[in-house]
Image: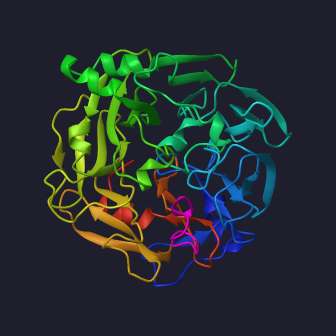
Amino acid sequence: MDAAIRAALDQRFPRYTEYDPAVPIWCLTPHRGGCLHRFFDTSPLSPSGRYLGCIRLLQEERPPHPGEEAEVVVVDLATGDERVVARTRGFEGQMGANLNWGKDDRTLLFNDVDTATWDVHCVRLDWPTGETFRFGRGIYQASPDGRYVLCTNPRAMRRTQNGYGVVVPDEHVPSNFGLSDEDGLFLADTETGECRMLISVREAVERTAPADQLAEYDNWENYFFHCKWSPDGQRILFSLRRFPRGLENRLDLLHKRGTIRYDVFTMLPDGSELFNAVPADQWDKGGHHINWFPDGTRLSMNLNVDRTGMRFMEVNRDGTNLHKLFESPAGSGHPTIHPSEAFLVTDTYVFESFAYGDGTTPLRLVELPSGQESALARIRSATPVQKEHVSLRLDPHPAWDRTWRYLLFNACPDHTRRVYLADMTSVIDRLAPSWG
């Protein structure tokens, strides 16, 4: 983001001032609402920092039905203009249509669904002209240079958790009994449209699991879920979720049964150097939201490693040196480490102890290595319907822009989804003055 755009924020967007934030914050979607950015590992700002890309839900009262549409929205931070540039039927409530920026400020990448076949594809959109190119099996995350997209199976994500893939009729949600050779992690070229499987579910497990554990996987349904590029684009992280065969209602099992086991793998894009970095016997203790450290060699996450409560954790990409960043404070939400490694930022679920009990939650700033904590802001994140529809909660998902100086997050201060931007310059100057 250049200085002119930063200077224009106060002229174009309303400031958020409730509860006296520690940093300047602006609402970037002050008009119709219903907007959310993707996730805590992806910048919703374009490569230059001028444009915000987000998804607008056209109704926020219930989960989407198959074939319903959402809007793809671009906000010009220099002018304040908000423009609907496309519609998509490939979205859910937590991460929208997995909207990513491509190679430049003109290129957006997102999921869409062909309702004639219920197949999923990735859309490459030149949003100023409306020119589109459809390819592959969908998108979860784009590489940092925008050339490639990773995806698992967007239709199958609903087996373990609603909100992260696409909605299709139940009879079109795939099933993976045992270890699949056909389902896996896919890579697509955004220029040519070529799409290929990088690794199957079967191969990932058979190359990493002890021989005496393979029979267990065959007795479960196995699905890849998250997949993430390291910030330098050199490595890939992906997760496997599994649950026993024979369950009756095999949709959104994370919120119904508590019977899911997790494994998290890392590898090079050519399939080599494959590791099960955080195996199920660790996740069974309670854990979530694994992410890359900015250096691309380590992973961060929340994990109840001692079964005494969630802690912020670090582990090498090969699974070695799993350890707490500090004993206190406890972990929460979606932690992301600043590349200075002077601090981390995370959000809080409304049911966690750090929440204020009235639907507002803090954006937490935790200094490294001391663990000293303060609140960057307090803002409402509870939605009116999340008790009835857990997939329609609104996670703030604090995400850094590409300069690592601005933080984007979701909130719901007036009962509709909005996207905010926080200027973290003062925090960086105080905690990491020599960084950058």
| Camera-side residue of 10 and 323 | 323
| Camera-side residue of 316 and 50 | 316
Q: Residue at x 75, y 71 (%)?
A: 31
Relative to 64, say whether 361 is above or below.
below
Q: Is residue 382 magenta?
A: yes
Q: Is residue 301 magenta?
A: no
Is residue 180 visible from the viewing direction of this image?
yes
| Camera-side residue of 402 and 262 | 262
Q: Start and end of the magenta stretch?
A: 381-392
Is residue 101 visible from the viewing direction of this image?
no
Quadrant of the rendered image containing residue 222: top left
Relative side of 78 to 315, left or right: right
Relative to 106, say whether 190 is above or below.
above
Question: What's the colour scheme?
Answer: rainbow
Relative side of 384 to 375, left or right: right
| Camera-side residue of 182 and 197 | 182
**x, y percentage for residue 70?**
74, 53
What is the number of callouts on the image?
A: 0
**x, y percentage for residue 21?**
45, 78
Q: Residue at x 48, y 54 (%)?
A: 399
Relative to 292, say whether 371 is above or below.
below
Relative to 379, say whether 35 is above or below.
above
Q: Residue at x 46, y 83 (%)?
A: 20
Quadrant of the rendered image containing residue 148: top right
**x, y percentage for residue 33?**
70, 68
Q: Residue at x 30, y 40 (%)?
A: 299
**x, y percentage for residue 388?**
54, 69
Quadrant of the rendered image containing residue 220: top left
By secondary structure, the bulk of the magenta-drawn segment is best described as loop
